Amino acid sequence: MPVNLTSTDEIKLGGAFTFPGTSMTVHRMGYGAMQLAGPGVFGPPKDRNGALAVLREAVAFGVNHIDTSDFYGPHVTNQLIREALHPYPTNLVIVTKIGARRGQDGSWIPAPSPEELKRGVHDNLRNLGLDVLDVVNLRSTLGIEEPAEGSIEAPLTVLANLQQQGLVRHIGLSNVTPAQVAEGRQICEIVCVQNHYNLAHRTDDALIDDLARAGIAYVPYFPLGGFTPLQSRTLSEVAQHLSATPMQVALAWLLHRAGNILLIPGTSSVAHLRENLAAAELNLSDNVLQELDAVARTKASNAA
Ligand SMILES: NC(=O)c1ccc[n+]([C@@H]2O[C@H](COP(=O)([O-])OP(=O)(O)OC[C@H]3O[C@@H](n4cnc5c(N)ncnc54)[C@H](OP(=O)(O)O)[C@@H]3O)[C@@H](O)[C@H]2O)c1
């Protein structure tokens, strides 16, 4: 297994997944663009050409699923995507999200009102240079770090209306509870759910299995631990044994976890991008999967 890739490597990127009720098929290994904005996901990147290179490399290696939002920067990440990739390859699926905005100081502010949601869709269209958005996730801000219960009917109905107007093809949900997914599915077709999940943070195990049965994509954010990168002795030992890196093992574990999991690891580095894409080639045996399962159990008992 290559720990890194060269531009001539042929990679499968984890196989294909078709979003339910759509003709949109993507490789399971995608790319999350949040890290391309400046520090704190605010302002321009330190290395603008480097950011453009990451996006172009991702697509050159076959990535056809990019996750973004107009509140990354704000506007910066979408403008970089447009500059690097427009006119977009026909098979590229860009998934964005609305429901928050940024303060002058970089703070994250809930933006669930109808006006703010409409503005969010139009900001994404303008900055990405699109007439219609492939997938828009409603990002619940009832909870900021983790989902919190409460009805999502009002904001989701606004988004469903924007879909009926032809500005949005498909709808997903982010930072939601199983009850909110069930409520959302009564309002409109939900093609994906994007929540915090990784090897050490497994609150959504049952939800992932439910969504798999319904054919709905589950897209973990912070697959590598986000702002607090995953660290575990087991992960490091397994990685060493497989001649891979801990981050590659963490991504491969997610691909093995369930067939409806789509990956969007974030990076601002071409070297890390290549390393992450190569993780799709990593096979994990049943024994290794059992060892890795213990990472979450250890974390749970430490927290108890
Ligand atoms: N819906 C939501 O509320 C929500 C919230 C957060 C994120 N997201 C989405 O999810 C995507 C993924 O999340 P994320 O980017 O926050 O977190 P992540 O993918 O878990 O981790 C990104 C961090 O890991 C580092 N990294 C990446 N590849 C690495 C490698 N091979 N070796 C060592 N370090 C590596 C990155 O630094 P370098 O830049 O130095 O590589 C960055 O600091 C985002 O890009 C965004 O699109 C959604």
Image (cartoon, grey):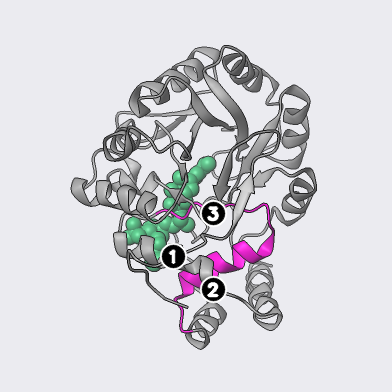
Task: For mark 1, give the secondary structure.
Answer: loop
Q: Is residue 47 visible?
A: no
Q: Quadrant of ligand 1?
A: bottom left
Frontmost residue, 14 versus 99: 14
In the figure, residue 189 lies in which quadrant? top right
Frontmost residue, 133 versus 122: 133
Q: Position of residue 10 (x, y in %)?
A: 44, 65
In the figure, residue 245 lies in which quadrant? bottom left
Query: How far apart are the alpha carbons under marks 3 and 2?
Result: 14 Å
The residue drawn where x is 23% and y is 40% is 44
Is 287 placed above or below 137 here? below
Answer with left or right where residue 259 lies relative to residue 121. right
Q: Position of residue 170 (x, y in %)?
A: 60, 28
Is 223 placed above or below 135 here? below
Q: Is residue 21 visible?
A: yes
Q: Which residue is mark 3?
A: 263
Q: Which residues are magenta?
A: 243-266
Q: Which residue is mark 2?
A: 282
Residue at far bottom of view:
241
Residue 10's disc number: 1
Task: For mark 3, give the secondary structure.
Answer: loop
Q: Earlier in the sequence, mark 1 or mark 2?
A: 1
Is 291 placed above or below 49 here? below
Q: Are marks 1 and 2 in contact (CB under 8 Å)?
A: no
Residue 139's disc number: none
